[in-house]
Image (cartoon, rainbow, N blue to C red):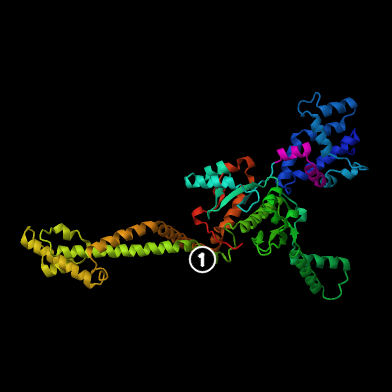
Amino acid sequence: MAELRATPYANPLTGLSNDVIQGLLGYMKDKRRTQQLQGLAGLLESTGIPQTVERAAYAESPTALLNSLTNVNRANVPLLKSETADALLTLSPVPSGANKAAMAVGRAGERVAERVVPQIMERGGLPAGLLQDLAQGTPSQIITGRNARNFDYMKELEAQILKEQGVPQKEILQKTGIYFGPEGKSRAEISDLEALVNLENLPKVTSPKQTYDEYIKTKMYEQGDTLPEGNLEDEARKYAQQVYSQQVNNVTQLQDVLNHPELYEAYPQLKNYGVSGLLADGSTKGSFNPAEQRIRILGDRTPDEIKSTLLHEVQHAVQEIEGFSKGGNPDVARGLLKGSFREEIYPLRLGESMFEDAADKYGKASKGLYMHKLRELTQRQNITPSQITNMSPFYEYSSEIRQELGAMPKRSGYEQKNWLRSAAQMIYEKEFNQGKFRDVIDLELKELESLKRKASREMEKYREDARESSKIKNKYKNLESLSDYEIYRRLGGEAESRAVQQRMNIPKESLLETLPLESYDVPLNEIIPKGIL
């Protein structure tokens, strides 16, 4: 059987370029790469560059080479304009002294891709523009506030006026770019479309068990059939602990991990926040410690997962700077729930107390007026049955009244009126003897009417505080029945940070079409403002 060989390139230079581009495409299209890199691969293919260079590599004459590069007689391959040809030269640099074997598809191509793509983006110009304009990235939106250096206070004032006019939040956002969070504070958004995560600078943490096992295997391999001297297990355990200690204490600045100029323009202090690795020990993917100003991130995941978690934790840092609703963790969620209840109810306590005091006075005045009416009925000459039977206490004491006075005479006249006056007297005595009205019985009618009017005005003044207090109490009563994890999910800072992740794929031009509060994955009326992280 004849040996199968690859068709040799007719043009070494374009053949070398073809190998580089195919290696670059293979690297960028790998599912382990970010969506941005995968999108860049789609861009590169859509330009027709790979097909054109491949044809040029096999062109056997100058005319055929020219035709392949200018798309003569090849309607199925896009025409290479002069600026696209320049982009091609940038996309496929030829290192001096490189040879075809060294640039084999897969290995060398991947190395070139790792180096070339960042260089293209850093260099800017048309090639970078081509990549940036057509790539499908993974944008997110960091939510900012009044402490951001680029916050628009005039737009905030406009938003406040619209809010007072009763304009819906979504319309306020579309007109001003400002909206108001669950705790009422002003917010805006900055796009993360341009943000890039440098995974090479992200500190990694290896589990001590993995380090331990690898150490044992390495030592056993080095010793061969000869058993290592000393206690290998103790040696491996100490080594694993040493490595782990070094890794968890390794801190990198946020600006070295997250390239986000717009974020640092708003909050320059964030550039110097620390980033450390996190050990995979459960469901925790990241954390933020405001006291240390440090973010911990779990590595060993896809780039997009790491970016999503990193932006979640950066949002917690912004919450700390702005005094927004903050986050926490399930272990402390129930305690935060109680603290949040105290914080929410505290501003309303005075109003609620004043309302209750006014309601008490109103009730007493009403009772006093009721007793005055009863006393007046005991002496009224033209009393009618409805004036007695329409009183609720009549039915409370009706059995005793009938037992004492007998049945009410059916015919209107002296006997019926006398019976009604006697019934009114019995009700008056029973109410008085129960002690319900002794504190107001001695007040004059005018005093009681004045007290009732004043109490009514006080109740109206503080009614809204009392109503809001009642709503908050009912809210927290329902929240108390939830599990610790569900309470944690309703912490304002956690819900907001998840909303940042939810909005990752919203294009920058569509930001104002969707209110960030609509991206919350828990009901807004169940948000817990208080948090610790």
Q: Nearer the viewer, residue 68 or 429?
A: 429
Neighbours of disc 1 within 10 Å: few (<14), some (14-19), many (20+): some
Q: Is residue 384 magenta?
A: no
- Residue sitting nearer the eye, 372 or 500: 372
Quarter of the image where one finds residue 246:
bottom right
**Residue 228 x/y as whole percent:** 86, 72
Q: Which residue occupies the extreme bottom position in the image?
A: 230
* In this rendering, position of residue 470 left or right of residue 484: left
The quarter in which the N terminus is drawn is: top right
User: Does residue 8 appear anywhere in the picture?
Assistant: no
Q: In which quarter of the view is residue 455 placed?
A: bottom left
Q: Is residue 64 left or right of residue 386?
A: right
The correct choice, above or below, for 374 with respect to 433 in the image is above
For badge 1, the amino acid type reads Lys
Residue range (magenta):
113-135
> Furthest residue to the right?
97
Q: Main secondary structure of the magenta part?
A: helix
What x and y, as percent, mark residue 377?
A: 15, 62
Reply yes or no: does residue 130 show up in magenta.
yes
Q: Name the residue located 80 percent from the left edge and 47 percent from the top edge.
A: 114
Vertical arrangement, residue 205 with respect to residue 192, above or below: below
| Residue bearing the label numbered 1 | 338
> In the image shown, does 116 or 464 lie closer to the viewer?
464
